[in-house]
Amino acid sequence: MRNSSARLKNMVSTAAIALGVWALSNPALSSQLEYDREIHLKGTTNTRDIGGYTTSDLRTIRPGQIIRSENLSRLTEADFQKLEEIGVKTVIDLRTDKEHEKKPTVWLGDNPPQFYHFPVGDADDAWFKAQRSLIKRNKFSARDSQELMVDGYRTIAEEGVSSYEQVMKVVLDQSNWPVLIHCNAGKDRAGIATTLILEAIGVDRETIMEEYLLTNEIGRSKEKAELMAKESSKSRRISRGPSADAWYPIVGVQPEMLEAYYTTVETQYGSMDAFLNELGVDQDARAALAESLTAEPQELVMGE
C-alpha cells in the first residue's frame, strides 16, 4: 500500500482508524481505502475516493460515496465489476461532446448506473484549440505549458458554471450516491468538481489543495511527462522535443492552476460562498450535504 503519511496529514488519528475499520467491513474497498485512496483499475491510472478527509468541524467524509476519475472508456469487465461492488449508482461525465463521442463509456456490467453528461467547455473553444496548437507545434517550454493550463482554469471558472450547477444538483441528492465524476484525464474538470464539493462541506483550502495535487502521485504525472518527452522527440525525428518539465503541466496538476480558478471565481463573484450560492448550493444545502456526506469518526468506527 502507498505510504499515507504525506497524503493524510490532515486526518485526525481517530479518523484514520475509522477508515481502516470501515474498509475491513467492506471487501470491495478494503484494499484501496485503509491507507490508499486509489481505486485500482486496469483501465485507468487516476481513479480515487475522496472519503476520509476531515472538515473544519472535525467530521470525516464517508468513504465510498464520491469518486473522481479519468475517462472510463478503457475499463475492463473486471474494472466495471469492481465499481459495481463499490456500489456506483451515478456517473457524471464532464468531457466535451467530441471527447464523449470519441471515447464512449460502454458499461460491461450487470448493473449500469445512471449516466449524466454535463460538458465543461467545447472542443472548439479557444483554450482547447490553443492546447492542441501547442502540442502540435511540438516546441514549447514549461512556462508556455503552465501559462496555457492556468488560462484553461480561468476559462473553466468563467464558462463552466452551468455544468457545475448541474453536477452539484446531482450530488446534493443522496439517492444518487455513490457518484463517480470523471473528465478525460481526471485531473482538471473532475478536480474542480471535487474542489466545489469539498468547499461546500467545509474542508479547508489547504486540504483541498492536497487532495487536488494527489493526482500527480496516483496519476503518475512525472512518468507520463517523461514518456511524452520521449515520444514527442521520437515521433518528429528530432533530437529534442519538449522536455518532461514542459509536458508536466499538461499531464499533471500544479498549485498555480487551482489558485487561478479560485482567483477568477472570487474576482467575479466576491467569494467562494457567493459562487456556491450561484450554483444553487446555499447554506441550507451545504449543511444538509455535510450532514449526509460526513460523520463523526466514532460513527465510522461503529460502522454506522
Image (cartoon, rainbow, N blue to C red):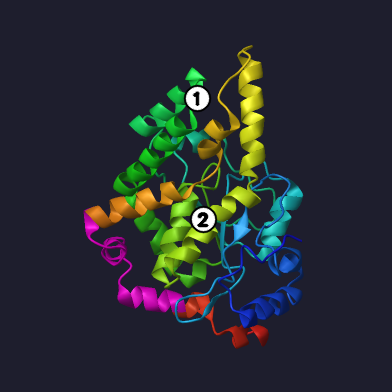
Is the stretch drawn in magenta largely helix, strand or loop? helix
The location of residue 266, given as percent across then percent down, is: 27, 57
Residue beneath label 2, please?
212
Crowdedness near tag 1: few (<14), some (14–19) or many (≥20) residues, C-alpha within 10 Å: some
Q: Nearer the viewer, residue 81 or 237?
A: 237
Identify the residue at horizontal 55%, vertical 85% (top origin).
Answer: 296
Crowdedness near tag 2: few (<14), some (14–19) or many (≥20) residues, C-alpha within 10 Å: many
Vertical position of residue 176 compared to residue 68: above or below: below
Vertical position of residue 33 compared to residue 191: above or below: below
Mark 1 falls on what kind of element? helix
The location of residue 303, given as percent across then percent down, is: 66, 84
Which residues lie in the magenta part? 268-290
- Answer whether residue 227 is magenta in the image: no
Q: Quadrant of residue 159?
A: top left
The location of residue 300, given as percent across then percent down, is: 63, 82
Q: How much space separates mark 1 and mark 2, taking CA atoms?
A: 24 Å
Q: In terms of sequence position, does the residue under pointer 1 or pointer 2 come before the other?
A: 1
Mark 2 falls on what kind of element? helix
In the image, taking residue 294 as reference, residue 231 lies left or right, namely right
Image quarter where the N terminus lies is bottom right
Q: Nearer the viewer, residue 293 or 166?
A: 293
